[in-house]
Amino acid sequence: MTDAAAKVYDDLVHAAGNREVYNPSSPVAEFGANEPLHLDAGLDLSPFRIAYNTYGELNADKSNAILVCHALTGDHYCASPSPVTGKPGWWSSIIGPGKPVDTDKYFVICSNVVGGCMGTTGPASIKPETGKPYGLELPVITIRDMVRAQKMLVDRFGIDTLFAVVGGSMGGMQVLEWTVSYPDKVFAAVPIATGARHSSQNIAFHEVGRQAVMADPEWHHGRYYEEGTRPTKGLAVARMTAHVTYLSEQALHRKFGRNLQNREQLGFKFDAEFQIESYLRHQGMTFVDRFDANSYLYMTRAMDYFDIAADYDGRLANAFKGSKTRFCLVSFSSDWLFPTEESRAIVHALNAAAASVSFVEVETDRGHDSFLLEEPEFFRAIDGFISAAARARGLAR
Amino acid sequence: MTDAAAKVYDDLVHAAGNREVYNPSSPVAEFGANEPLHLDAGLDLSPFRIAYNTYGELNADKSNAILVCHALTGDHYCASPSPVTGKPGWWSSIIGPGKPVDTDKYFVICSNVVGGCMGTTGPASIKPETGKPYGLELPVITIRDMVRAQKMLVDRFGIDTLFAVVGGSMGGMQVLEWTVSYPDKVFAAVPIATGARHSSQNIAFHEVGRQAVMADPEWHHGRYYEEGTRPTKGLAVARMTAHVTYLSEQALHRKFGRNLQNREQLGFKFDAEFQIESYLRHQGMTFVDRFDANSYLYMTRAMDYFDIAADYDGRLANAFKGSKTRFCLVSFSSDWLFPTEESRAIVHALNAAAASVSFVEVETDRGHDSFLLEEPEFFRAIDGFISAAARARGLAR
């Protein structure tokens, strides 16, 4: 690379938030002109690529594959350290040898979603026609688009039927979409802390986040890559807003209450005086170092668009008609972003469709983020369900 | 005024969001150098002024005065049209002839709080020492400071004891503070949809709003008045976030659901596609036309600082010890910003202090904003309580 080219590249990396966007350290599946991704927007994305990780080994008849779907700001480093933050995989508590998703038994695939910023094609990727990053020229991506891309990746492995698809929040939406788009290709499904459609309130919070990004003059209508800038302030505000919705009032109260940060007394200033304030500012600041602002717009939009029943005359049960998949729904009692009623509505629809379904509401005060945390009851539920499904699938030794 | 001076004035008005800041159309009480406002921050505010409105007539023995306290973004136009928006007074459903707060019987006083932007001294006011707007040089204002200023205004009327103090949300905080700071000067108190302290989650949402304002480069560390700019984008995002917290999930679902704005189908764009999105954008945009961004910072900070029990070893009941005031607490079942538990905690403390207290939880799905809306059960509760208190006070005819 010439010095000038290296500078351009460094600027791109800086603007996109991390180097993985352009140079993934994980395996990558490339899909050329002959394998376009058909998008719900009515356009084809081509060429495109999917960055992914695998854990464990695929068995001889390829019947032990578990697809793990990540959430809004997640990535494919579910069980190995993130090359960006150096932190352990975001679900390494649940995925690994001897863990509920046991990599001694199962072959785990986790891919970065389309529209993301960890190596799979997204708004920071170079658009072939222009030689510049897509920015907002990337069509709006849907949950179904993400799943369609995952199917193409799974096909590459020669896997006919996934043993299980598992995910929480936006990951749970992908799980549901898998069971509807490819009903014969999913033996067991575990949608966690999710819903069959995004609620009005959830759309509202997402819209606030997007407006915060777009209000940042460094956003440049999504063309900040070329400007060498980043809408970090707007993205941080978006993350802060979202972060409040991931926690519960009780958890915040227990963790922070009205505790002051550095003082015995109120300082009568606009600095971060309460611990909750500095915590939130920290959440905002660290997030922008790893995530691309435009990807944030695409991910939130994908969730807002999600509404499984919409294609079935508003009848969710019709979406699952004749489903042979075994479902295990999990919700968390203090999750107010995806409250238990959302999971229950799916359970009712599955019951109406005579599908096999079990459902667990885990008692916890830790809010939506519970699905990422150590929750013994949750782990037991996953472990029990997957073990039973494995026996039914003939996988148990 | 010279042309240059007029230009400076127009710029100031523009930056502050409305003309009332500098040139109130309402009565104004001026407090000169001999009557400073002692602030909790340890400084004096002097000179200062209070913009206010009155409705009805003060009786001969001055025993029929009701002080109405406004909420975060409210003003003293509680029962007459706002000169800024032209809309009816924000509480004209409840205050007026023959209404629950009956201006045929009572003398209603409502003043803009200190730190506000509708004529009472606030961050947009000119600091005498510099001849420029205070900006963030105005000390942080507390709920107690607001109440101390109101007391000085009430004294101007020669009123010894207020018949009642009434308010919702931040207004309810002022009501509570009145009963603690001036226990002998309040006959009846009606704190509505409020709490004795601001919760961690509420501080969190406020902090997000403040960060949105401060992230706006047009904010200029609070000195935008002199720059002739306004942090409208940041303030709009702050308002949008807050607005979501004022409504309930059910109300949003009923009002907007996932309805699309202009199309039969999803547009695969980042425009406001869902009705909830354009509604929120509208809320953000209209707000910045009437409200000063720095005042927003001061108001939210005042609420965050509020914690009555803090001065009483954390024992709320001690704050009300020996209180002769009659209390009527009102909460709304779907209010998740100030949930019923917050009111109940106050009721318990008042009971422990052997104070006179009644409590109504109004069943509604309209969230925190219910206190500003037509809610028959709520109106009946206010009417019944005030009528009974009037009889006890010897005011009934």
Image (cartoon, coloured by chain):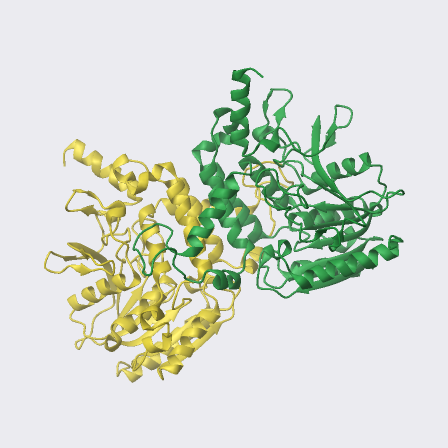
Chain colours: A green, B yellow
Left or right of B137 in this view: A49: right
Residue, far top: A2
Q: Is residue B35 above or below residue A171?
A: below
Q: Position of residue A23 (x, y in %)?
A: 63, 29
Left or right of A169 in this view: A211: left
Left or right of A237 in this view: B78: left
Which image quadrant: the C terminus of chain B? bottom left
Q: Position of residue B102 (x, y in %)?
A: 32, 71
Which image quadrant: the N terminus of chain B? top left
Question: Residue sitting at 39 percent across and 78 percent down?
Answer: B349
Q: Which residue occupies the foreground of this view, A71 or B154? A: A71
Q: Is residue B221 above or below residue A191?
A: above
Q: Which residue occupies the foreground of this view, A282 or B106? A: A282
Q: Position of residue A57 (x, y in %)?
A: 81, 43
Q: Which residue occupies the foreground of this view, B293 or B78? A: B293
Q: Position of residue B276 (x, y in %)?
A: 54, 48
Question: Residue sitting at 37 percent across and 45 percent down?
Answer: B288
